[in-house]
Amino acid sequence: MTTLPTMDVGSRIARLRSTFEVAEIDALLVTRLPNVAYLTGFTGSAGVVLVTPGDAVLVTDGRYAQQSTEQLAHAGVTARVEIASTPAAQQAALTTSPIGTRLGLEAHGVTWAQQRTYSEWFTAETLVPTEHLVEGLRAVKEAGEVARIKAACDIADESLAAVLPRLKEGITERAFALALEWEMRGRGATKTSFDTIVASGPNGAKPHARPTDRVIGEGELVVIDFGCVVDGYCSDMTRTVSVGDPGADARKVWDVVAASQRAGRDAVRAGIECKSVDLASRAVIDDAGWGEAFAHGTGHGVGLEIHEAPRVSATADATLEAGHVVTVEPGVYLPGIGGVRIEDTVVVTSDGAEALTEFPKSLVI
Ligand code: ZN
Ligand code: ZN
């Protein structure tokens, strides 16, 4: 694998602070782990970051004493690290420096139980629900982040090329999925970015089918939706293929979905509303009469999480910006018959989009 460029992790806490005024908070307690990772480089399974006007502290437990210090130093982040393994120690660690009067919590990342605990810990402050402050920063990727997503996409492309011929052997969905995952791990991926989908024949009608012991037959549509993680960043791609000719009806569905995917991709550029990209993809499928059979949004952001901002759907209210990384993945699902989905991950540029997943799209193998 090629060397990954460094990322400017060290400036992210300051950028987060610059959102506080509009959010009407003095400090933010960051509890969602992908946000903790984004701000500090720390990737442990437990930890919170408190960002106050004059201080930033990562509080984690004894399992991560060494790892947390190493990761923050490696990322060039100057936040303090406090190791606290009991609730009392965590409270003490989070209340040592002045917070101000209004402490933001991440409304989407705090359970009811946590909210009750924090209201007991922070008695001098008013707790304020905030919406997606860190996620808003994360949506626009810097070059180093795009390079990681691209590296994950390249591994996915190469892995599919390596295992696709095995579809001709009479392989099961489960064995094919495992082969794909094995190839990705062997090429340097740390894990899959979500549970691999390999859905053949009638199983393809379920957009999120799980691989079964069904043997993939000749002339059947096979939906393969998969991705991997490189240095924390996800890839996402779907191809629908058939071993041999799947027949005129299946070819027609595939052609329509391919045209819909192209229309969506061609619509992507900085300044366009996400809902307009969805509409561009959806119109092609609507015109073919399968509008009802396309029962999900056209795409989603990809980064540290497989699904993140911005969403690309009919109800999304965001506008695409240069540096957003989104998928375009229309599909048609016909119960009892099968399904077709084609998906690329692309990075938005000022005048269009650059594909990060580049595996060729062709139906028959
Ligand atoms: Zn996907
Ligand atoms: Zn996707």
Image (tube, rainbow, N blue to C red):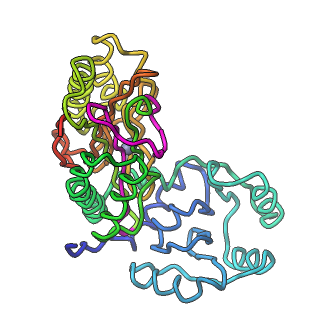
Residue farthest toward the bottom in the current orientation of the protein: 66
Could one spot residue 22 in this view of the protein? yes
Q: Position of residue 215 (x, y in %)?
A: 39, 42
Residue placed most toward the observer, 240 or 89 = 240
Our reading of the magenta stretch's main secondary structure is loop
Could one spot residue 27 in this view of the protein? no
Quarter of the image holding residue 287? top left
Image-based side of 14 in relation to 251, left or right: right
Looking at the rendering, the stretch of residues picked out in magenta corresponds to 205-231
Instruction: Answer whether residue 276 is magenta in the image.
Output: no
Q: Position of residue 300 (x, y in %)?
A: 39, 41
Residue placed most toward the observer, 133 or 266 = 266
**Image quadrant occupied by the N terminus:** bottom left
Q: Is residue 332 above or below residue 35?
A: above
Q: Is residue 253 above or below residue 8?
A: above
Quarter of the image holding residue 350? top left
**Image quadrant occupied by the C terminus:** top left
Residue farthest toward the front in the current orientation of the protein: 170
Q: Position of residue 26 (x, y in %)?
A: 61, 60
Q: How many marks?
A: 0
Residue placed most toward the observer, 334 or 330 = 334
Instruction: Answer whether residue 212 is magenta in the image.
Output: yes
Q: Position of residue 135 (x, y in %)?
A: 47, 52
Image-based side of 256 in relation to 203, left or right: left
Q: Is residue 362 above or below residue 150?
A: above
Q: Residue at x 41, y 59 (%)?
A: 192
**Ligand 1 shows up in which quadrant of the image?**
top left
Q: Residue at x 42, y 65 (%)?
A: 191
Residue placed most toward the observer, 345 or 310 = 345
